[in-house]
Amino acid sequence: MLVELFNVISPVLFIALVGYFWVKTGNEFPTDFVTRLNMNFGAPCLVFVGMLGLGGDLTSLTNFMFASGVALTILLIATVVFVYVLKLPKRAYIIALSTTNCGNMGIPLCLFAFGEAGMSYAIAYFTVGCIFQFTVMLFISHGNLSPGSLVRVSLLWGVVAALLFLGTGTTPPVWLMNVTELLAGFTIPMMLITLGASLARLKVIKFGKIATIGTIKMLGGIGIGIATANLFGFTGVERNVLILQMSMPVAVFSYLLAAKYNRNPEEVASLIFTTTLISFITVPMMLVFLF
């Protein structure tokens, strides 16, 4: 079991450390450029390839995506209640605690833990999570939401393209699969390197308070993931992926929003760094539980 856990976690840890030490040793890392490249080209191709990888099971796919939306909605509601009860800075903590790092960290973990099927479901969750981030989280962060914000979520074009092929029962041409698989191939390692580079630039403040809140967030996500999986009757890979994705730390994207709109960015950065550290304890425990 220890060898299996190491095989799952080590690629995520070591590739993220590449980005972390690259920045810590004084080298430049164009985080904004790489993030834009991933989101505008890599992520749509990853979604396209991942959804096609489910083998045309549209019912299973849509049911899982709906369950993911339900789980994230419950997490959002629980976060709002938690933040108001503890009188924390509202917008900052809501946008942080109601997100999960389902892309940079969640997709690779699900791939190495549960194989290609696990990656496909993780990508489906990631798609729903991105829609939340670019709509609900944007609205919470600055109180404004335009219909165009959803159109600008480029990975949705990958979803639409995959659904067209799945819905019509047609096979994409070989050249299209070659191009999208090649672009999707660089996305996961670049996500991990970017995660490490981002963590290297974040500073932790109020460690005791942040660590306590971060631990509650992680445990709450796990609990909601288990409850939602049970509610939808998920078993096997579907259940495992939903629970693991819900157990992920705070998303790096929440810091970008907090910094852009001045929503306590230092505390959000501390939450990201601290919950990521906590995840290296909770993820092995979760994998033992799920296996």
Image (spheres, helix red, strand yellow):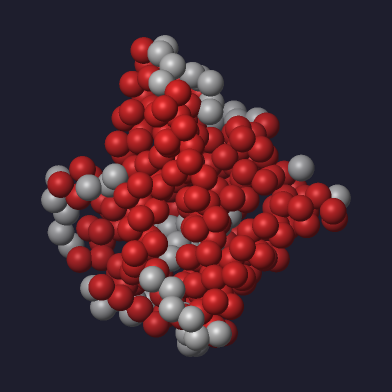
Expressed as whole percent of the image width and height from the top left, the position of residue 55 reads 53, 21
Name the residue rendered at 43%, 36% in the picture. 180
The foreground one among 280 and 139 is: 280
The foreground one among 188 and 97 is: 188
Image height check: is 234 above or below 270? Answer: above
The foreground one among 55 and 183 is: 183
Expressed as whole percent of the image width and height from the top left, the position of residue 156 reads 31, 39
Name the residue rendered at 36%, 12% in the picture. 168
| Residue ranking furthest to the top | 169
Q: Is residue 237 left or right of residue 126?
A: right
Q: How many marks?
A: 0
Mark yes or no: residue 47 visible.
Answer: no
The answer to which image quadrant residue 171 occupies is top left
Name the residue rendered at 16%, 54% in the picture. 145
Expressed as whole percent of the image width and height from the top left, the position of residue 36 reads 33, 58
Expressed as whole percent of the image width and height from the top left, the position of residue 215 reads 59, 69
Q: Quadrant of the C terminus?
A: top right
Image height check: is 133 above or below 209? Answer: above
The answer to which image quadrant residue 277 occupies is bottom right
Name the residue rendered at 62%, 43% in the picture. 111
Q: Is residue 6 left or right of residue 267?
A: right
Mark yes or no: residue 133 visible.
Answer: yes
